[in-house]
Image (cartoon, rainbow, N blue to C red):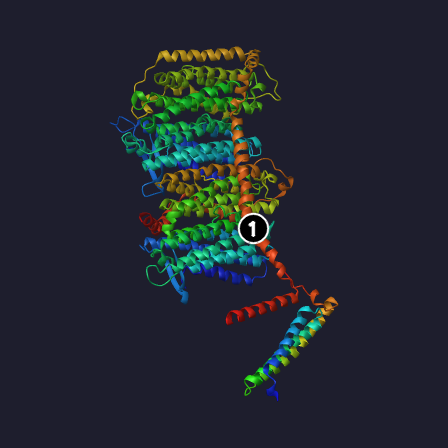
Amino acid sequence: MIDFSYTVLILLIPLFMFLLIGLTSGKMKPALSGYIGTLAMSVVTLLSYYTAYQYFFNRPAGTEIFEKIVPFHTVWVHFTDTLYVDLGVLLDPISVMMLVVITTVSLMVHIYSIGYMHGEKGYSRFYAFLSLFSFSMLGLVVATNIFQMYMFWELVGVSSYLLISFYYEKPTAVSAGKKAFIVTRFADLGFLIGILILSYISGTFNFVELTDPQGALITQGTSLTFMGISALTWALTLIFMGGAGKSAMFPLHIWLPDAMEGPTPVSALIHAATMVVAGVYLVARLFPIYYFVVPDALTIVAYVGGFTSLFAAVIACTQTDIKRVLAFSTMSQIGYMMLALGVSGYGGEHGLGYMASMFHLFTHAMFKALLFLGAGAIIHAVHTNDMNHMGGLRKYLPITHITFLIATLTISGMPPFSAYFSKDEILVAAFEHDKFLFFIEYAVSGITAFYMFRLYFNVFWGKSTHYHHTPHESPLTMTVPLMILAVASMFTGFIPFNDLVTSNGAAFELHTDWSVAIPSVAIGLVGIAVAWIFYKKQSAIPDKLAVTFKYPYKWSFNKFYIDEVYLFVTKKIIFNRISAPVAWFDRHVVDASMNGISWVTNAISDQIKGLQSGQLQKYGFVFVSGVLILTFAFVYFLFN
Amino acid sequence: MLSEIPLSYFLVVSTLMFFIGIYGFLTRKNLITILMAVELILNSVNINFVAFNRYLFPNQLEGHFFSLFIIAVAAAEAAVAIAIIISVYRRYSNIDVERVDTMKY
Amino acid sequence: MDFLTLFVVVPVLTIFAIVFTKNMKQTRLVSAIGMGVQLILAIALVFMYLAEREAGNTAEMVFSHSYVWFESLNIQYIIGVDGISVAMILLAAIVVLTGIFASWQVDFLPREFFISLIFLSAGVFGFFISLDLFTMFLFYEVAVIPMYLLIGIWGTGPKEYSAMKLTLMLMGASALLLVGLLGIYFNSNAGGGDLTFNILEIAKVNIPMSAQRMFFPMTFIGFGVLGALFPFHTWSPDGHASAPTAVSMLHAGVLMKLGGYGAFRVAMYLMPDAAQEMAWIFLILTGISVVYGAFGAIFQKDLKYINAYSSVSHCGLVLFAILMMNKTALNGAILQMISHGLMTALFFALIGMIYGRTHTRMINQLGGLMKIMPVLSVSYVIAGLASLGLPGLSGFIAEMTIFFGAFQHPDVFHRVLTITAAASIVITAVYILRVVGQILYGPVTNEHYLKLDDAHWYERVSTGVLIVAIAGIGIAPLWLSDMINDSLNPIVHQLMQAIVK
């Protein structure tokens, strides 16, 4: 058995860095905090790579499948005699893979930010938050139990909030952070209730026990029902709700586009590569339960994923803010991953969708981080997010241009770049399981190619816009991460995921299904061609189309008015129709009745205070009459 | 000779005096008159004390002592009351009892 | 003299010392020293208690002593602590000390102010150590009365009105409570023997059901009013809004805990049968408290009102958990009391400090404070995050223990209610983030604010101690949770027996 107990350092180093940078911020030179933060992160990255190497390629001889290993755990708190919370590290294929993804992207973002955030106010605060986020995200993926996962889940939510609101003097950034936190918090409520039900039924939080196909939960299920539906279906659907919130699935997606108010490196790290895939990771983590016990919930997962991917892709076609286009494309790609999980089976080749989902998660992290960091470089150069104010940038930003092109080709699914392989597997899995979803995804890959190349052409080709000052290529700290990620986007597709990350840990054979692969490349090419015609040179076609399809265009441009619906619900209903009446009720009914008691007392005393007139003779009169009456009464009763 | 006058005669007189005093106390507005009315009440009690003592317990003297006490206390009381009345006069420039109602609610 | 009595003696000695001080500087120094000693004693008590348990002492109450002080009615001064009271004493000591530091600049009648404050704290400590109903009630009154003076004299806004309202409502409650306690007393010889006020003695007796039915609601409501039980919570917003900083801290931080503590130590422990029977009524009321307080807080504009309503919601959760009557939920209730005590104290301290600088508490008049006073603002964010239940801070573990405990209840009604209560965490997030976004972030609304300074050393001490305590409990809750857990056994045992019957 290999000793993995050092993996706890992967968590502790970022935590320590958060405390160190956070507490010394203001006293330490800002630049220093950037360097030590990056240094610490590279140590963590190396540790993760070493862990991955040890885990995947150095497993004990004779074991066929990748086991779940818990090298470290400690009791955090007891709830009941049987239900307790551990803090620990769980290593299995997906968590090790996530370690690699997170540390890689995080390290790239750390390096990149040295250049990007240079001279910004709150530079060390930024690095403190990045460390906090890395800690929370790593803690999330290595969680040994669902409660630990929930804890770190909340922590990543807060890190995300803090980083979105990083420019706290900008009202839009503040409200975007607030929105992100509250929407995900609402979704997390579902997660929490799901855990409550799940732990009530199973009596444990532990993933190893929960997801064991021979374990009590999966073999026995539960007889509990609520409103005619099995309690476990409720639980896992609610848990998926948590995942959907974090992963920006329809209809809980509204926070993600706004989250782009945060600094671009943050968007790359949190809102593209790592945190937003936590929902996918959650479903993957609990996959055996979904598959064996509650297939209905799994169908929901598949359809929500499928719908979101289409929905987001359509919106992405009309947005003009480059970061928002990327945000919608992220939603769309995560929809793919969810769908892949939703159509997957368990074990060996049946688990193709599971494998494909994790594979796509991995490649997506690389190319989407690259796209965001590239977008950051563009924004850094021209100081705007709006692609209408860009054009012809390929002359000024050669490195950014090439890497961005690689990423765009990758996301469009062009061979031999990485996403070609992962997306292809997803399509195959969907094709085998559900033809309807397959056609949706098939269409989405065409739309994806279209809107990504629309972005690409608009920014790097087309009209050459007049800039206030000539844009220039970013410093090395920014371009080196771009190049590294570009290499990763090109070659990670060759990693044999079918041997490494599978639903039950066992390797299986992979066949290329040409009947799916060739059409998918073809539709990607069609999308690129359309974009080429529309946007390579300035052309009137897009505007004409926008006029012809006025309403669809308007709806897509306004993101189908989902934001407005939310605004209506929160502002009009919760604030004005619930909260205001509650406040009014409290003041004018509850409090008034308390005041009423004192008012009644007061009123009575007001009525009888006249007796205390201060007139001596009145008192005397009352006194004397009283005595007389008493005397007569006394005499009368005594002698009768 | 005294024994020929029944006790009830004394009691009728003292009762009359008492109620005249009460009447004066309740109706007069002048503080001095009120004080005089109070003296009437006290003296009616004195009559009672003395009369009861004489008729019921001729061998004892408590009733007489009580009336002496009351006379002494009444004198002291008159002194204090007149002092108060003078202060009232200084404050209100008259001694009308209805004006002195500061101690109300 | 025994160790526990020191907790009452130290404040009294401090008061005597304050009488002889000459100016504000001496007064506050003496107060800080006195309460510092008190905190050290409290920490020592925790260690002594743990050592005692480690050594195998399984008595229900340790360090206990009793002295008869009114023989004909069998009133005794009985003291003793278990893990719960130890935890509450620690909480009280922390909040009182930080309260002293938060009122470092009180310059109007400082001696009288600190004397009242410390007198109040003596009542609180006495309440937590006493095991005799009458003595307990006595200390309870001692803790409530100085509140009137503190708010009426040193308060702001409509202070007489608020002080009067608070005192009258609490007095009304204690009238009810007194009847309840006397009811318990006169039924305490049901098993034969003398009438007694001794809690441990009464616990062994089965109070007749008819008496329980009458006196349980009285006692529970009597304590519940102090714990902001809906609909008797309205003293809280007005009282807090007018109270000076340290008083708000002590009141929300410690005094409201007297309610929760009394509700389960007296009402539930001594009358478990009626508790089982009537719990559902109060569960609905507290369930309303939890959600209603949170919704009420969304709409408020005054920082103190927001926190007062938030306290209604959080303290509602305490009573809610107590009524769930299982060990986990009760443990959660105690943790929530401690957590809420610390974090509300922090909130009110910070609000006082912000108010002291900007002279307004209206959130629409404040803005961009993060830039001007980063230390205070970061502390405020931490308090907010603790309040909305961020893991790693104390609020999370407390709420989770409550939810997971309450959800273990076999009855569907209770579980649905638990989910309803859990929904309040979303609403909490809404009002906390709204406040943070409005007053700390965004552009600076008033340029006068740019000249304001950040936290002074005494303010840093005050907030720092509270933050360390909050984070300490949040990161390593095990020792506290275990300490409380062991002490819950007798109470849970009582309640379980009631179910069996």
Position of residue A58 measured from the top left corner of the image (x, y, whole percent): 30, 28
Residue beneath disc 1:
C243
Position of residue A189 measured from the top left corner of the image (x, y, whole percent): 43, 34
Q: Quadrant of residue A132?
A: top left
Q: Tell me which residue sits at (58%, 19%) in the image.
A: A388
> Is A159 or C299 nearer to us in this picture?
C299
Q: Residue pushed farthest bottom?
A: B1
Q: Tell me the chain of label 1.
A: C
Position of residue A109 measured from the top left corner of the image (x, y, whole percent): 47, 28
Q: In this orientation, does residue C279 appear?
A: yes
Mark 1 Cα within 10 Å, few/some/many (few <14, many 20+)?
A: many
Q: In this orientation, does residue A363 appear?
A: no
> Is C378 or A482 nearer to us in this picture?
C378
Position of residue A393 measured from the top left corner of the image (x, y, whole percent): 55, 18
> Is A606 or C44 nearer to us in this picture?
A606
Badge 1 marks a residue whose secondary structure is loop
Please name the amino acid that badge 1 sits on.
Ala
